[in-house]
Each structure stands twice: as structure tokens, then as C-alpha cells.
Amino acid sequence: MSQATLRDIAEVTGLSIGTVSRALKNQAGMTETTRSKVREAAMRLDYDFGQLKKGRIRRIAFLLHSQHNTLASSPFFSPVLQGAEEACRREGVALSFIAVDPAEPVLAQIRVHQPDAIVCAGFFEPEVLAALQQVGKPIVLVDMHSRGVTSVNPDNLRGGYLATQHLLRCGRKRIAMLSGSLAHYSIQQRNRGFRQALFDARVHADPSLEVSMPFIDEGEEAVAEAMRSLLALPKPADAVFCYNDSTALAAMKFCLNEGMKIPHDIAIVGFDDIAAAAAAIPPLSTVRVDKEALGRAGIDLLLHQPDDHPSQITVPVEMIVRESSCDD
């Protein structure tokens, strides 16, 4: 059976080939009804969206989920955006930032900016990602993973392993992990690294020492509640690996307010190495992620990686030891 063409879609819909092409490329100048009609016909005919000719990329949309567009998340994603902007300036490409709210029509939010390609930073629901892929433009995921889509991620697994291994070497016996939703690829991988380090050290993994906070926007109160539960155990935690620095700093604040000494009573390690980590009292041990490099790599992949060869790039991480985790 021969592959469906733009002409086939035009015949089925009764539209011109030019209109069909503009609709599939998500360009302006038509109603949403027409656009949907073309898209549905293309899917019905099993049209290969890879056939769309992709010209030179001149405009890139940097998409960030609205749940990440918060004070807690911005110390991580702002440098990622900065790295992306640097790469775009170097390449002579325009970059626009869009905070995506899944409650609103995502494609309509993007269409205003008329991008030639898309960077998705952080977590996106599967249905949102599927809608973005239907647009037929090159996409790169940053700090996220989806099979068959080009992505760039920190070495989350290695980072979780290094953080936990460090706490074990500091002599800690009851190491807890404070995480967000494991639906997030990065958090899931950090949790895997945590468990692997315990397994390799032949330390029993106690489920009561793993606490997940599914909602990012609950803030410090959610962290305080999690820390209360860990410290109220018959055998309380003597160390906590937090899935990011914002959570670690909130955990440290709670412990200090409770009159605990860090790291004497409890050791704390974060992840990301945001600016506030080194400035904390005591300074926070953490896993350093080169956030600007993530943004630059995302743009480089969009501009120089063939669309038909999805690749997964992993950026190395580094354990940074400060006063929050070891007495010496």
C-alpha cells in the first residue's frame, strides 16, 4: 500500500494542498475547525508526519509546565532557560518562553508564537506530550524522557546513587528519601539510584523511610509533615536524601526549628545545587547539575540532530560535599 500524501488528504477534505500543508505545519491563517479536519484526515489515512519538509529553524518555543513555573522550581529551570537562550543567540535563533497550563488548549498557546521547533522542559502529562507531537515539529525534552523522543537529562540515577553512598560513608544507618511524584522521570531515576546504593551496601530498604509528596505546590508544610513522620518512627531517620534542593532546604529549616543540630542529629543532602544551597546555614551538600548545559544541549539537539534518529543525551553530575551531611 502506497504512503498517503498531501494530495490524498486534500482530496478527502476538499481543501487545497497548500491549506493542508499549512494546517499540518500548524501555521496561522485558518480556523481551528479546518485545522482539526485536516489533522483527523491525516491520522485516518495514516499519513507519515515525517514527510513534512522542515526548513531552517528560526524560532523555538521553550515550554515549561505551569507546575514548574513556581518559586520552588525557578532556581532550577531559570538557568536551564538561560542556557537555551545562550545557545539560541549563538545560532541566531529566536526563543520564546511559554508557561503551559494543561487546563487551557495547549496547541492554541503555542500557535501564537509560531515556532519551528519545541523544547519541553520538565514534566508534562502524556496527553499533553501526545498533542505536542501531533503538531509535527521537531521536539526535544529536557529533564524528561519519553520513548522515541529526543531528550537530554542529568544523570539522575548516578546522582541518587552518589548522594546515598555519601551518607552511608558518613556512617548513617537510617537513610530516608523524600521525593515528589514518581511519575516524574527525574525523580523516579533519583529514587532508583537511592535504592541501588542501599542494595549495594547491603542495607535493608525500609519502606517507611521513603516518603513521597505528590503535589509540588504544597510547599514547606508538606515537607514539614513528611519530616515529622520520619522523625516519629520507632527508629527515626538519621539522614535524609531529598529529591531536590528546595525540599532539602525546607527539611533543614524544619529540623533547625525543632532544635535539632545538623548534621549531628540528622544529615541532609539535596539535588541540583541551586544558588541557595551553598548560601544555606549550614551549607547544603548536594548533587550538582549543570543546568545551563542542559538548556544548551536541548537547543543543539534541535538544530543539529536528524529528526528521524531520536537520541538520549545524559549530562554528568557531581557530588558536592558541604557541612549539612558530615560532622568532620
Image (cartoon, rainbow, N blue to C red):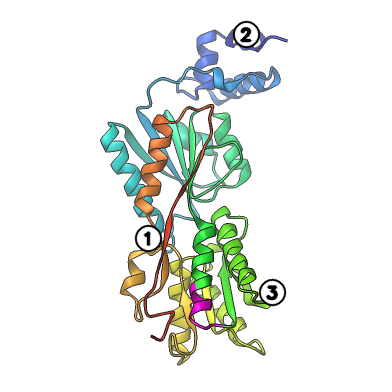
User: Mark 2 or mark 1: which comes first in sequence?
Assistant: 2
Q: Earlier in the sequence, mark 2 or mark 3?
A: 2
Rounded to the nearest angstrom, the CA distance separating label 1 from label 3 is: 30 Å
Residue 304 visible in the displayed image? yes
N-terminal label among 1 and 3: 1
Location of residue 68 in the rendering, given as x and y in whole percent from the top left corner: 47, 55
Q: Residue furthest right?
A: 1
What amino acid is labelled 3 in the image? Pro
Q: Is residue 257 magenta?
A: no
Q: Nearer the viewer, mark 2 or mark 1?
A: 1
Query: Of 84 and 154, which appears nearest the observer?
Result: 154
User: Could you tell me which secondary element the residue under label 2 belongs to?
Assistant: loop
Image quarter (top left, top right, bottom left or bottom right) of the N terminus: top right
Range drawn in magenta? 166-172
Q: Nearer the viewer, residue 24 or 164?
A: 164
Q: Which residue is mark 2?
A: 14
Which residue carries the number 3 mark? 207
- Inspect the image, locate mark 2, and give the three-letter code of the amino acid beneath it: Gly
Above or below: residue 318 compared with residue 136 = below
Q: Are marks 1 and 3 in contact (CB under 8 Å)?
A: no
* Residue 33: quarter of image: top right
Looking at the rendered image, the disc whose residue lies closer to the viewer, 2 or 3, is 3
Q: Nearer the viewer, mark 1 or mark 3?
A: 3
Q: Is residue 112 visible?
A: no
- Label 1's element? helix
The vertical placement of 232 against 41, above or below, is below
Kind of residue indicated by mark 1:
Pro
- Quarter the C terminus occupies: bottom left
Which residue does the numbered mark 1 point to in the structure image? 75
